[in-house]
Image (spheres, helix red, strand yellow):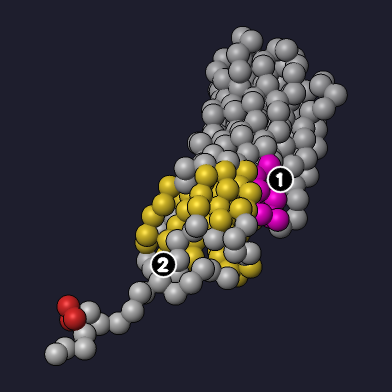
Amino acid sequence: MSSNPGGFIGTNPLSGAPQTVEYLVVAGGGGGGGFFGAVGGGGGGAGGLLTAAGFAVATGSALTITVGAGGAGSDSNSGNQGTEGGNSVFSSITATGGGASAAYNIAATHDDGGSGAGGTHNQTGGAGIAGQGHDGGNGAGGDPYTGAGGGGAGSVGKASISQKHAGDGGTGICSTITGSRVFYAGGGGGGAATGATSGLACGGGGGGAVNDAGGTVAAANTGGGGSGGWNSANITNGNGGSGVVVIRYSSSLNAPIATTGSPTITLVGGYQIYTFTSSGTITF
């Protein structure tokens, strides 16, 4: 009589709960600034980006996941400040939301953040947080007063090159943690006047607007900064992109005991990957 009924070979391939995981935590991007007093708005700063492998996790306890919202762009001609992006959190890891920009002659013309917002006419850009992002660009002087780019996770935002060229947003960072190449946390481009060149953006940030147009909204779940606008109507400028939290570890280990927040679950390249685009929890 066979001692191996059914001919099964080996044991359950899952070998226990993970002791460490790899993570990507990207905060929400800041909102872009708007036209005010014939001055183009600066680009919003990207959300802070933190990523690492080997992060120790406790088993049996729900770990908090918070996905930061993108900040709203300012209204043109109102002089209002845009709003900063929301922080994103995984357990003890917190990425800081991107700084928001306003426009010239506003008391708070830019914000610090995970990456700083771009400045406007003769204004210094906001400061980024070391290890999360970079500073926003400085605004140049002289008519027609273009805006500077917001900082990104990969580089500082570009200053206004001249009155005829707004600053580009700082570059984002490419990650393959989801199994695909995705750029995250690019700064928003500055706004420019008719005949001028608006700022570019990389990594989800919005490209700058040119004359009588609202700034571009950054891509969702990238943490990109919203772009600056140049428009005489009271319309909203570029909103920052929402953040994202991604966790992955070996597919040979047990799946989480529980998750909330409905993460997207994929199995790629020997990893099980949990992508959160809304807040929730994960329990290993």
Q: Earlier in the sequence, mark 1 or mark 2?
A: 1
Name above or below for residue 180 compared with residue 200. Answer: below
Number of the front mark, 1 or 2: 2
Please state which of residues 245 and 126 is positioned toward the viewer in this rendering.
Answer: 245
Lateral position of residue 5 relative to residue 153, left or right: left
Measuring from the top left, give residue 143's x and y in whole percent: 72, 22
Amino acid of disc 1: Thr
Q: Which residue is mark 2?
A: 251
Please state which of residues 47 and 104 is positioned toward the viewer in this rendering.
Answer: 47
State how many labels appear. 2
* Quadrant (top left, top right, bottom left, bottom right) of the N terminus: bottom left
Please state which of residues 263 and 177 is positioned toward the viewer in this rendering.
Answer: 263
Q: Residue at x 59, y 26 (%)?
A: 238
Q: Which residues are magenta?
A: 87-96
**For residue 110, what is the image quadrant?**
top right
Q: CA distance from mark 1 to mark 2?
A: 30 Å
Name above or below for residue 192 compared with residue 186. Answer: above
The residue lying furthest to the front in this view is 1
Q: Residue at x 85, y 24 (%)?
A: 107
Report crowding for label 2: few under 14, some 14 to 19, many 20 or more residues within 10 A (C-alpha): some
- SS for callout 1: loop
Residue 92 among magenta residues: yes
Q: Residue at x 75, y 50 (%)?
A: 129
- SS for callout 2: loop
Please state which of residues 104 and 278 is positioned toward the viewer in this rendering.
Answer: 278
Task: Identify the disc placed on residue 135.
Answer: none
Q: Which residue is mark 1?
A: 96
Measuring from the top left, give residue 196's x and y in whole percent: 58, 26
Amino acid of disc 2: Ser
Measuring from the top left, give residue 185's x and y in whole percent: 59, 46
- CB within 8 Å, label 1 to label 2: no
Residue 265 seen by the camera:
yes
